Amino acid sequence: RALPTSAGALRQRLRQCAERIPEAEAVLDLLEKCPEHQKKGSFPVIVFEGLDATGKTTVTQAVKDNLNGILLRSPPACISQWRTVFDDERTPIKRAFYAAGNYILASEIAKASTQAPVIIDRYWHSTAAYAIATETSGEVQDLPPAQDEVYQWPEDLLKPDLVLLLTVDPEERVRRLQHRGLEKTKEEAELEANSLFRQRVEESYRRMVNPACQEVDASPSKEEVLKTVLQLIKKHCAF
Ligand SMILES: Nc1ncnc2c1ncn2[C@@H]1O[C@H](COP(=O)(O)OP(=O)(O)O)[C@@H](O)[C@H]1O
Ligand SMILES: Nc1ccn([C@H]2C[C@H](O)[C@@H](COP(=O)(O)OP(=O)(O)O)O2)c(=O)n1
C-alpha cells in the first residue's frame, strides 16, 4: 500500500529516493533528530481535521487564543517548503513525505504539551484519509471495509487526546471555497471537481479508530462553531 504506517517504513522509502531527490535526504536528517516513541506532556493535545474550507484554520486560531495554547500544523513549518517537490512525485513518495511530517510534528507536540494546550491543524488522520481516498475510486462502498487496518493509528506515533472532524454541508463548503480563492493543491482541485473523492475522504475520516474522530457540524457561524468546540474540549480534556 502507498501509505507507510511506521517510522521505519517511511524512512526506508525516503532513503530509496534520496539520491534522486535531495529534499528526501533533508527530511531524513530532520527525522533522525526526532527521538522515537515520543511521549505527550500533561497538557491536552487537540487535533482538527476535515476537508479544505471546513474552517480548520479559523477555528484552530480561535481555540488557541481562547485557551492560551500553542498552534501546530502538519506538515510542520520546517518541511513545508518542500511540499511542492513531493506533491509532484509518485504517490508512495508523496505519502512518505506527509507521513514523515507527522512524525516530525510528534516531537514538536511532545515538547509543546509540557508547556500549554496544543491545538493542531491536521495530523495523521488527514494523511490516512487522503491516501485511502486516492487509492480507491467510485463510491464510498468501494472503500476498504470499516474494520480494515488502514483505519488504524500507527503504533509508534504520539496520540492526541481529542480529534474533532469538522464537516459542512456541500453547498456551504462551495460558498466558502469561492470566498477564499487561495491557491489550491492539485488534490484539492480534484476534490472540488469530483465530489465522490470528497465523500471518500470524509468517510475515511469517519472510519478512523484508536483514536476515532468526533464529528462537529461546522456549518453554523464562526462564533457558534467555536462555542461547540470549546464545550467538547472542556468535556473531554481535563486541565
Ligand atoms: N463558521 C463559519 N461560517 C462561515 N464562514 C466560515 C466559517 N469558518 C470559516 N469560514 C470561512 O470559510 C473559509 C475557509 O475557512 P478556513 O478556516 O480557511 O478553512 P480550512 O482551514 O479548513 O481550509 C474562509 O474564508 C473562512 O473565513
Ligand atoms: N497531515 C497531512 C496534511 C496534509 N496532507 C495532504 C492531503 C491533501 O493532499 C493536502 C491538503 O492540504 P491543504 O494544504 O489543502 O490543507 P489546508 O486545507 O490548506 O489545511 O495535503 C496530508 O496528506 N497529511
Image (cartoon, helix red, strand yellow):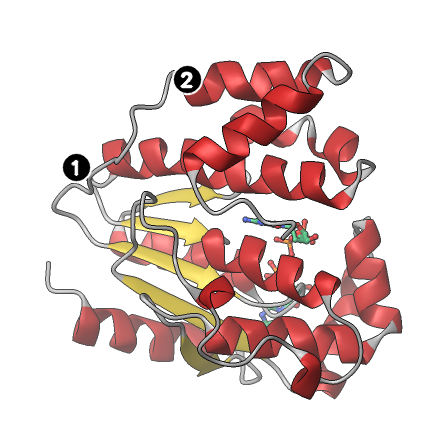
Residue that appears at 54% across and 85% down? 220
Q: Secondary structure at mark 2?
A: helix
Q: How many marks?
A: 2
Residues under labels 1 and 2: Cα distance?
A: 22 Å
Give residue 129's quadrant in the image: bottom right
Give residue 238's quadrant in the image: bottom left
Of residues 211 and 220, the one drawn nearer to the viewer in this rendering: 211
In the picture of the structure, the residue carrying the numbered disc 2 is 32
Q: Amino acid at mark 1?
A: Thr
Report the quarter where the C terminus lies.
bottom left
Q: Secondary structure at mark 1?
A: loop
Residue that appears at 40% across and 44% down? 71
Residue 39 vertical placement versus 23 (above, below): below
Residue 117 visible in the displayed image = yes
In the picture of the structure, the residue carrying the numbered disc 1 is 114
Image side of residue 114 versus residue 25, left or right: left
Label 1 neighbour load within 10 Å: few <14, some 14-19, many 20+:
some
- Asked whether mark 1 lies closer than 8 Å to ligand 2, one says no
Image side of residue 200 versus residue 32, left or right: right
Residue 186 vertical placement versus 33 (above, below): below
Of residues 62 and 190, the one drawn nearer to the viewer in this rendering: 190
Image coordinates for residue 68, horizontal then vertical, percent: 27, 48
Q: Amino acid at mark 2?
A: Glu
Image coordinates for residue 91, horizontal then vertical, percent: 74, 45
Image coordinates for residue 8, horizontal then vertical, percent: 44, 32
Image side of residue 94 versus residue 213, left or right: right
